[in-house]
Amino acid sequence: MATISTKDFWQDFTIEAVPAETPVGLLVSQANMLPQKTSSLLKGEVSTYTEQNIIYNTFYIVAPRLDHYRYALIQVVSGPALYPVYVYDRSGVDYTPHSVTVKFPNITAAPKLPKASFAARDYEDFEKAVKAILSSEETAGIIRSLMSQSKALQSVPTVLT
């Protein structure tokens, strides 16, 4: 009987070889800062799902006092590679004249997606896009509104049914 030899064709993967700065990592770090910025009235949350070889990361502003209302502020769409990523700004800014077509190299069955607000070729581009959205007046208005409504309910006792 012949012996089957097991050969290892994989490269060595170490945690040091994994990029420290990633799009989802930046979203998570910003989500973790939101309670500090809003006196814990709001929190940030990042949700991820995949479909047809595409990764969707969504940044939510969550208002726990408003029955855990979730506002999807930013959605980031990518393939399995870190870049390019496509950023959808849901703050209410109209980017139509500046929108970009979503294209994924090496993914033949990618779904047709609406034009994105921004395309990021690398971490620096992505960071600029996220900064523009988080520091915008439109986002500040959403935050102030949710904080105001949450603060009004802060002193209301929870009704048990």
Image: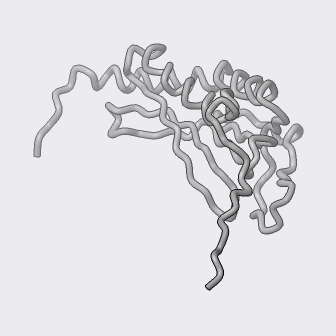
Image position of 117 (left or right of 30): right
Q: Nearer the viewer, residue 60 or 50?
A: 50
Q: Nearer the viewer, residue 48 or 102?
A: 48
At x 22%, y 20%, the residue is 155
Classify 52 as above or below 78. Answer: below
Classify 46 as above or below 148. Answer: below
Give the color scheme: rainbow, by chain, secondary structure or one colour.
Answer: one colour
Residue 111 percent location from the top left of the image: 75, 64
Image position of 89 (left or right of 140): right
Residue 23 percent location from the top left of the image: 68, 34
Residue farthest toward the front in the current orientation of the protein: 1
Residue 21 appears in which quarter of the rendering?
A: top right
At x 70%, y 33%, the residue is 17
Residue 69 percent location from the top left of the image: 41, 39
Residue farthest toward the left in the current orientation of the protein: 161
Classify 47 as above or below 127. Answer: below
At x 61%, y 85%, the residue is 1
At x 88%, y 39%, the residue is 97
Classify 139 as above or below 23. Answer: above
Residue 36 percent location from the top left of the image: 44, 14
Residue 19 appears in which quarter of the rendering?
A: top right
Tally the marks. 0
